[in-house]
Amino acid sequence: DIVLTQSPLSLPVTPGEPASISCKSSQSLLHTNGYTYLDWYLQKAGHSPQLLIYLGSNRASGVPDRFSGSGSGTAFTLEISRVEAEDVGIYYCMQALQTPYSFGQGTKLEI
Amino acid sequence: EMQLVESGGSVVQPGGSLRLSCAASGFTFDNYAMNWVRQAPGKGLEWVSGINGRGSSVYYGGSVTGRFTISRDNSENTLFLEMDSLTADDTGIYYCVKRGRGSQPLWGQGTRVTVSS
């Protein structure tokens, strides 16, 4: 099974400053079809997970451009260029390369 | 607009059974693999089960194998999760998730399952 390891697990930030979350996979997430099956989600308190980035670097519809995803193979990063108060919540990476799909432990972003 | 709407969650006694449904709309349902993901109270996300577009291949997480059955009715654009021998560890919110090869994933809002006597 593929294991995803996120860091840090807690991320205190100041509004207007950048933030970065790492997600490392135990195996490459590159499929033979050329897609990299790594997504990023934000779960705000009391809400369902909200898709931010899919296939490693594609921003989901309606997601502000301050969010970006990068990386390849086994190492991925979610970056927020300028954190806003509404970005508070828990961030998860998820791999959908092979079943069982798996998630990182979650990173709690706090202001 | 693409949408997934889960239903069927409720309070059930340990050892009981429950059937969850997920109604899909706004996309060609049988073109996409579908999944169930759950979240226990205060915990992270856990993939539960998946099924391919035709329903011919199914997959399960280790904690539910032998107890849960995933299926789909492509004529009704609906995904199901039959859950048997439920325990307190199965308590949580269950999400329906569309995951195509190169397309944007889609999640429903979830349905709550509580296993308690």
Image (spheres, rainbow, N blue to C red):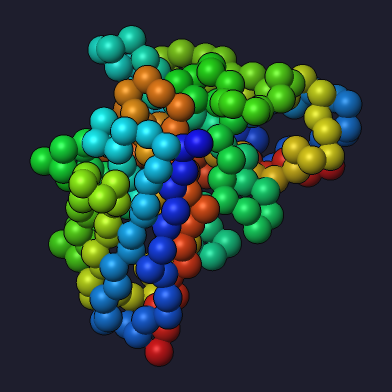
Residue A78 in view of the camera: yes
Left-right relation of B72 to A69: left
Q: Is residue B50 above or below residue A62?
A: below
Is B60 placed above or below A70 here?
below
Residue at image location 85% in from the left, 25% down from the top: A17
Q: Quadrant of residue B102?
A: top left
Q: Count of labels shown?
A: 0
The residue lying at 64 percent from left, 35 percent from top is A8
Q: Is residue A62 above or below residue B6?
A: above
Q: Percent position (x, y) of residue B114?
A: 44, 75
| Residue A5 shows in this picture | no
**Which quadrant would the N terminus of chain A be assigned to in this image?**
top left
Say which of B59 and B2 sits in front: B2
A62 over A104 or under it: above or below = above
Q: What residue do we see at 19% from left, 59% from top?
A: B69
Place of residue B18 in the rendered image (x, y in percent of width and height, measured from the top left)? 30, 72
Give the image location of residue A29, x and y in percent. 36, 21
Please indicate whether residue A57 sits to the left or right of residue B52 in the image.
right
The residue furthest top is A34
Outermost residue toward the bottom in this view? B117
Quadrant (top left/top right/bottom left/bottom right) for the C terminus of chain A? top right
Residue A97: name its quadrant: top left
- A52, B30: nearer the viewer: B30
Look at 47% across and 49% down and name the residue there.
B108
In this orientation, which residue lies closer to the viewer: B33 or B75? B75
In the rendered image, the residue lying farthest to the left is B56
The image shows residue A52 at horizontal and vertical percentages of 59, 30
